[in-house]
Image (cartoon, helix red, strand yellow):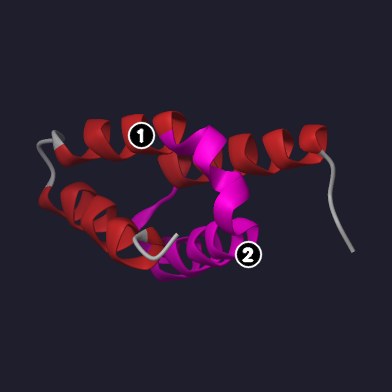
Amino acid sequence: MSIGGLLEELLIDGILYAFQEQTSDDANVMLNGFGAVVNALGQRVKTYLPQICGTIKWRLNNKSAKVRQQAADLISRIAVS
């Protein structure tokens, strides 16, 4: 089963929004979900890498060590893609 371009866009936008709005309580669940979606999309995620990298860069420059750690953990989960 394949998903269309619009659904891909909505999916990426949704996980980026959820990642940005997450609380520390659900960080591991969010990271696992984000990684699963990106890895499932495989090569198709290439189009959305600027958005994903922008979010990661913003979080890496955050004052909070937890926020920076979450960004680094996300990188480790999606680096394969």
Up-down relation of residue 45 to residue 76 (above or below): above
Q: Position of residue 70 (x, y in %)?
A: 27, 56
Taking depth in this image into account, of 73 and 81 the one nearest to the observer is 81
Residue sitting at x 52%, y 35%: 48
Q: Which residue is mark 1?
A: 55
Looking at the rendered image, the quarter that the N terminus falls into is: bottom right
Up-down relation of residue 13 to residue 2 (above or below): above
Taking depth in this image into account, of 1 and 56 the one nearest to the observer is 1
Range covered by the magenta-colored residues: 22-49
- The quarter holding residue 12 reads top right
Q: Is residue 24 magenta?
A: yes
Up-down relation of residue 73 to residue 66 (above or below): below
Q: CA distance from mark 2 to mark 1?
A: 20 Å
Q: Nearer the viewer, mark 2 or mark 1?
A: 2
| Secondary structure type for disc 2 | helix
**Dominant SS type (magenta):** helix
Which is more N-terminal, label 1 or label 2?
Answer: 2
Q: How many marks?
A: 2
Mark 1 belongs to which amino acid? Thr
Mark 2 belongs to which amino acid? Ala
Q: Which residue is mark 2?
A: 40
Q: Position of residue 36 (x, y in %)?
A: 56, 67
Q: Residues within 10 Å of mark 1 (few under 14, many from 20)?
A: some
Q: Position of residue 23 (x, y in %)?
A: 40, 52
